[in-house]
Amino acid sequence: MPSDLHLLTALDALRGFETGTLTPVALMEACIARIDKREDVVNAFAHFDRDQALHSARTARPGPLHGIPLGVKDVLDTAEMPSEYGSPIWKGWRPKADSAPVAWAKAAGAAIVGKTVTTEFATRKPGPTTNPANRSHTPGGSSSGSAAGVAAGFFPVAFGTQTAGSIIRPAAYCGVVGYKPSFGLINRNGMKIMSDSLDTVGVIARGVGDCALVASALSGIDLGNPDQSPGRAPRVGICRSPTWKEALPETRDLLPRIAEQLGMAGAKVEPLELPDDFADLIEAHPIVMNAESGRALGWELAHDPEGISPGLRERLTFGLSQSPAALAKAYEVFARTQIGFGDILGDLDVLITPSAPGQAPKGLEWTGDPAFNYIWTSLHVPCVTVPAGSGPDGLPLGIQIVGRRGQDRAVLAWARWVAAAIA
């Protein structure tokens, strides 16, 4: 076992447990030591109790995640820890039960480290978390603490959730792997739902294999071992997507470089642009997201509207002001594009597209633009971001692998292939 235990992947840690060279308590102690060293800068946790974390390691159940430290985004209910959803309205709230993702993680043997910082209701006002690569830059959001915590070595895996770009973008900004599954693959019961048509539970980790491991344990679906060779190179479409105008220079340079590297590794690479009508999602996504969020926060709007940040109130007002006709049109765009996407890929295995406009923006008041995420979230398809070098200020960049809905096992395998080809 290496001396830097806090940097182990979950799969490497499990191998250590199996051979007897590592124990869950020793791994948790290494993570806690790292937290002690860096948390005052990173601010990844909404709740952390070292005794509670150690107890979770000592009492971890046998199972596929036995003894693996796990961060839980604070929009997922936890019976033994506060669940505040990034909002002062819910300060000190203690649910009676764990959310389904947390319950199944515990049943699989995961050791919960703590609750990670989310933006307000996983949608708007950022928390205090900083980017581990440079504290003056955002870690992205809304899964801010989860992405930063994995990158900083606080835990090897963490829950994220995505309504627009809240898994893929922060994972890319922090230089780790993010996996947004096909819509509905991981049960959301006990999550603070904002958009019923979009919210998706996923995983942020150090490796693609870790994402498959955790999602398989939670969903009961065998997502395979992405570390195994698929036996051939993929057929890849390079897709700038309808929001390409938002790409910063580093991403405009990144995409052709990635295409060249994949071709040199043996992939069949060709350009593919989505049909023009997919650009309708640019207008449809915020209508659906904000209209559903406004309805979801009915209690908060009625009982403590001043506890909602002005920025979020503005977006909720926008959503609730949509006419029935506008909302119906937006849902029709969702349905039409979701049905049509699979055929567009043809014989391609996956698309390669940006994970974010560029490197993480400077400042902590904005978590970055989800321009390269919300289209895929609207389509309900699986997405994986893997590290892909660095930007002009040395901050991480990511590249996104996208596939057909329900083909998560294949998308994870091809994401691992891509990660190896561009390393």
Image (spheres, helix red, strand yellow):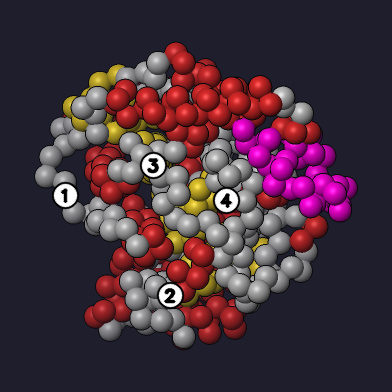
C-alpha separation, residue under disc 1 versus residue under disc 4: 30 Å
User: Can you tell which quarter of the image residue 3 is in?
Assistant: bottom left
* Image: 71 above or below 330: below
Pointer 2 and pointer 4: residues touching (CB < 8 Å)?
Answer: no
From the image, tell me which residue sits under label 1. 229
Q: Nearer the viewer, mark 1 or mark 3?
A: 3
Question: What amino acid is at disc 3?
Answer: Pro
- Residue 87 shows which numbered tag? none
Q: Nearer the viewer, mark 2 or mark 4?
A: 2
Label 4 Cα crowd, 10 Å radius (few <14 / some 14-19 / many 20+): many
Pointer 2 and pointer 1: residues touching (CB < 8 Å)?
Answer: no
Query: From the viewer's perspective, is 422 left or right of 74?
Result: left
Question: What amino acid is at disc 1?
Answer: Ser
> Mark 4 or mark 3, which has the lower sequence index?
4
Pointer 1 and pointer 4: residues touching (CB < 8 Å)?
Answer: no
Q: Nearer the viewer, mark 2 or mark 1?
A: 2
Overall secondary structure of the magenta stretch?
A: helix
- What kind of element bears circle 4? loop
Name the residue: 43% across, 75% down.
Answer: 107
Q: Nearer the viewer, residue 67 or 105?
A: 105
Pick out the residue farthest to the left: 231
- Residue 107 shows which numbered tag? 2
From the image, tell me which residue sits under label 3. 382
User: Can you tell which quarter of the image residue 399 is in?
Assistant: top left
- Residue 143 shows which numbered tag? 4
* Image: 94 above or below 58: above
